[in-house]
Structures are given as C-alpha cells and as structure tokens.
C-alpha cells in the first residue's frame, strides 16, 4: 500500500537539527520566519515520494523551500544529508 504511515511523527525541528536550514533542492538557506503559502517557506519533502511507496519517516524526509518541493513533484531525490 502506497503511503503507509509507520506511526512516527516527523517533526520539522528534527529535520532542522539533522540537516540545518539549507534547502535540499536549491541549497540556499530557508528563512524559518516565512509561513505557507510563501513560496520560500519551509516544507517537508519526501526523498522517495509517498506516491512511489516512500514512508513518512525521518530517514525519508528533508527540508525544502515550498517552491522547490512543488517543482520536484513526485520524483525521487538524492539523499543529501549525512
């Protein structure tokens, strides 16, 4: 089943603690004071999209600008954090 949720809550703060505030798409800083629907606001990207069988887990998420995330669509992205 696509998009199966494992029950874990993925918090933006956990992603920021791991990766910092750099966008995984354009590699520029994300201004955390901007809020949706600003195109430059933060959004959680699924590295392997839910529509392609990805899970909503910390290991499958990264921070992106909203506009970068929308541009990525449902493509699989490179795993950018260490």
Image (cartoon, rainbow, N blue to C red):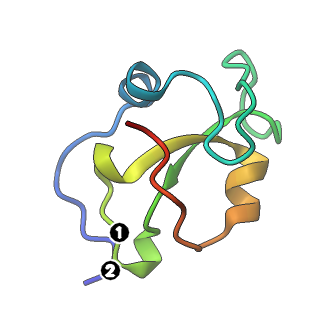
**Quick one: label 1, few (<14), some, or many (20+) residues within 10 Å?**
some
The kind of secondary structure element at disc 1 is loop
Q: Position of residue 51 (x, y in %)?
A: 45, 78
Tell me: 49 left or right of 6: right
Q: Position of residue 65 (x, y in %)?
A: 71, 40
Mark nearer the N terminus (2 vs 1) = 2
Image point (63%, 28%), residue name: 22
Place of residue 80 in the rendered image (x, y in percent of width and height, measured from the top left): 49, 46
For the residues bearing labels 2 and 1, Cβ distance under 8 angstroms: no
**Residue situated furthest front in the rendering:** 82
In the picture provided, is 42 more to the left or to the right than 1?
Answer: right
Residue denoted by label 1: 54
Quarter of the figure with residue 64:
top right
- What number is the disc on residue 2? 2
CA–CA distance in space, label 2 to label 1: 7 Å
- Comparing labels 2 and 1, the label whose residue is closer to the camera: 1
Q: Quadrant of the C terminus?
A: top left
Check the image and report above or below for 4 versus 21.
Answer: below
Residue under the image location 52 percent in, 70 percent down? 76
Badge 2: few (under 14), some or many (20 or more) residues near its Cα, within 10 Å?
Answer: few
Q: Nearer the viewer, residue 10 or 18?
A: 18
Instruction: Please determine whether, in this image, residue 3 is positioned above or below residue 43.
Output: below
Q: Is residue 42 left or right of residue 68?
A: left
Q: Residue at x 28, y 50 (%)?
A: 57
- Residue visible at 66% across and 69% down? 73
* Placement of the N terminus among the 4 image quadrants: bottom left
């Amino acid at each position: 089943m696509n998009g199966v949720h494992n029950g874990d809550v993925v918090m933006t703060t956990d992603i920021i603690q791991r990766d910092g505030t750099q966008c995984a798409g354009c590699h520029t800083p994300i201004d955390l004071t901007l809020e949706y629907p600003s195109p430059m606001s933060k959004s959680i990207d699924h590295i392997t999209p839910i529509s392609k069988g990805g899970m909503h887990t910390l290991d499958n998420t990264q921070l992106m600008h909203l506009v970068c995330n929308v541009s990525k669509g449902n493509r699989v992205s490179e795993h950018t954090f260490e």
